[in-house]
Image (cartoon, grey):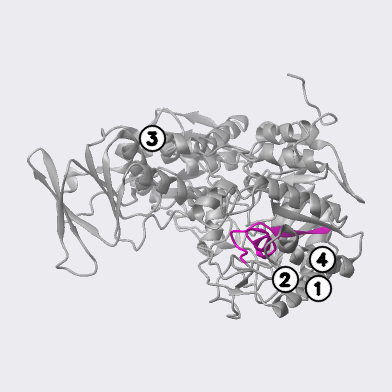
Amino acid sequence: MRETTASTDPLLQPYRLRHLTLRNRLMSTAHEPAYSEDGLPKDRYRLYHVEKAKGGIALTMTAGSAIVAADSPPAFGNLHAYRDEIVPWLKRLADECHAHGAAVMIQLTHLGRRTGWNTADWLPVLAPSPIREPAHRAFPKTAEDWDLDRIVADYAAAAQRMQAAGLDGIELECYGHLLDQFWSPATNTRDDEYGGSLDNRLRFTHRVLDAIRAAVGGDFIMGLRLVADEDWDKGLSREDGIEICKRLVATGQVDFLNIIRGHIETDAALSKVIPVQGMRAAPHLDFAGDVRAETRFPVFHAARINDVATARHAVAEGKLDMVGMTRAHIADPHIGAKIAAGREHEIRPCVGATYCLDRIYEGGEALCIHNPATGREATMPHVIRSTEGARRRVVVVGAGPAGLEAARVSAERGHSVVLFEAAADAGGQVRLAARTRRRSELIGIVDWRVERCEAAGVEMRFNTLADASEVRAAEPDIVVVATGGLPNTAILEEGGDLVVSSWDILSGDAKPGGDVLIFDDNGAHPAMQAAEQLALSGAKVEIVTPERFFAPEIGGLNHVPYAEIFQRHGVRITIARRLTNVRRAGNGLLATIGSDYGEAIRETRAIDQVVVEHGTLPLDDLYFALREGSENRGEVDYRALIAGHPQTIVRNPEGDYRLYRIGDAVASRNIHAAIYDALRLAKDF
């Protein structure tokens, strides 16, 4: 294979977009991380984008999308492009990104039917036709002529604000939003001049483009992120989509096309546009390349292009002009700089968990499953700096995600680190979760940290069940207990000894039964993975949960593959019911199921196996054995922790070491929480 250098690497070649020279081919496509405050891109939002600029990206596209009108209520933390107050905030963001060599654009939209009516100013949701979008559930009114006149003017005014802010350009959102809701026969059943023929369905878009160009002139860069094939028998065909692309190019009003394939009105459809782990990588790359070939026009694209090799291929083969590595930059905002410095192997991998987007769609903010600095740039470092103080001896017990992160960060700070692990391999619960083929990419969380620990000189002692005396013998200055937890199945009134845990199923320690009941009182991945594994083994499976809906800790995109498997294999889901006890019944078991909504509601199931998922209990014996000998007696100053400051508590001046416990050794949480625990403590060791 030909060796790639900085001068020959396709990804590092500059790209000229009209008057704008982009320093390489890497971009982050528009997405809304929900970091806005009052609809404005204040400090947290700005620092998130500036970090990518520092990291070598050529173009960061803000917003996903910024709304141009008050009657387009924000659906997931959208920026308010219809307010003059946004201009100085965006100007500061753009100026700082420009200072680090990156271009900045913004995506503008009117959401149309893709939002809710009962938020913001409680204005009616509108659309080309009164067709409800299942994902956001609003029943829209049919847009009238005065609505369209107003919105055309709103687009133009918003574009002027972006130009005044010093941004390098704008992108109009045309997939699942108002503009392309006019294009698609699935959402436009009008019989006026905006419905019927393709000319009519494009009429509103042309009005918007004309108004924007009249407002900002011909030199301000404008593109569209547009669906060119809805992959839907009700929607736009490939032929119609490419024809739309050609017609838009022919106007001379647009400068690039950012290509999407698919439709997004349900979680299941959205997951094909934004694939999650276990799904095909870069599924629409070839299609985007076809659009580029047929239009002979600048084409951008993003859809699960997680790795540098695929991105490099996309440019080298002429499929794309700019490659969107959006989730990959959430995992590591310094991809470009690491490639340019010959440190590609150090890039923190995106493992496809899509924790970031699921959090947004469930009303949270974007967080990477294994980079807790993303979105917390004001207090958490992406690059670990060497300590300016004394070099210490740090002992970490447990090589799950929390322990590995504590060891990595401590070693990169310059400390001498010993890591004890009872098992033969690192990973803890992540290694268990990654045994499911569909979620196998999760092992990248572990592998990356093991490699970084080895490079930083961490002494890793596997197959070592460290006790207090062994820890003390290592003469530590700091001890981090990251021993994790063990499944908590002792929650039934009777029969706890007759059940198995999700771990038992995933590890293979318990063979699948023929008829299995899973009681999920956690709502996260473990029970769902166990159910998936059991269903694929041929077992008859019922999931019982006391929740109002199943798996509330799993967002919509990750919900999709579970739902598909469960429906295909006939998994029964019973909500709002609670497993109370289990008894033996001949060669099988008898499970009693009650309800929180009435004591008299009880029924029984005759089954072969019961799986109970109720999180974990801390494996904390070592912590308590070490607590009294520590300087801080294990205490954490939460105010300092939240502010990102070092821990200074002293409760025992005679103590020999400082002691902390992190991750599930504290309480049952998740991978992100465990790694965040480790980073925000160890960064100040």
Q: Which residues are magenta?
A: 169-189
Eye-nearest disc, 3 or 1: 1
As for residue 178 lying within the magenta part, the answer is yes
Query: Image height check: is 599 above or below 517?
Result: below
Q: Is residue 506 left or right of residue 155?
A: left
- Horizontal relation, residue 263 to residue 653: left or right: right
Q: Position of residue 536 (x, y in %)?
A: 35, 36
Q: CA distance from mark 3 to mark 2?
A: 59 Å
Label disc, if present, on residue 91 of the rendered structure: 4
Q: Earlier in the sequence, mark 3 or mark 1?
A: 1
Is there a contact, CB below 8 Å, between mark 1 and mark 2?
yes
Amino acid type at circle 3 is Ala
- The x, y position of residue 257, in whole percent, is 77, 50
CA gap, disc 4 to disc 1? 16 Å
Query: Which element type, helix, strand or loop, lies under badge 4?
Result: helix
* Residue at the (46%, 37%) spot, across then down: 438
**Residue 85 shows in the view:** yes
Q: Element under label 2?
A: loop
Say few, some or many: other residues with alpha carbon within 10 Å of mark 2 (under 14 / 14 to 19 / 20 or more): many
- Give the amino acid at mark 2: Val
Residue at x 54%, y 60% (from the top left corner) = 361
Query: Considering only order in the chain, which callout, 1 or 4, is on the residue closer to the N terminus?
Result: 4
Using the image, tell me which numbered label, if any, was put on residue 68. Answer: 2
* Label 3 sits on residue: 466
State the residue at coordinates (87%, 70%): 215
**Between residues 277 and 214, which one lies in front from this camera angle?**
214
The three-letter code of the residue at mark 1 reads: Ala
Mark before the other along the chain sequence, 3 or 4: 4
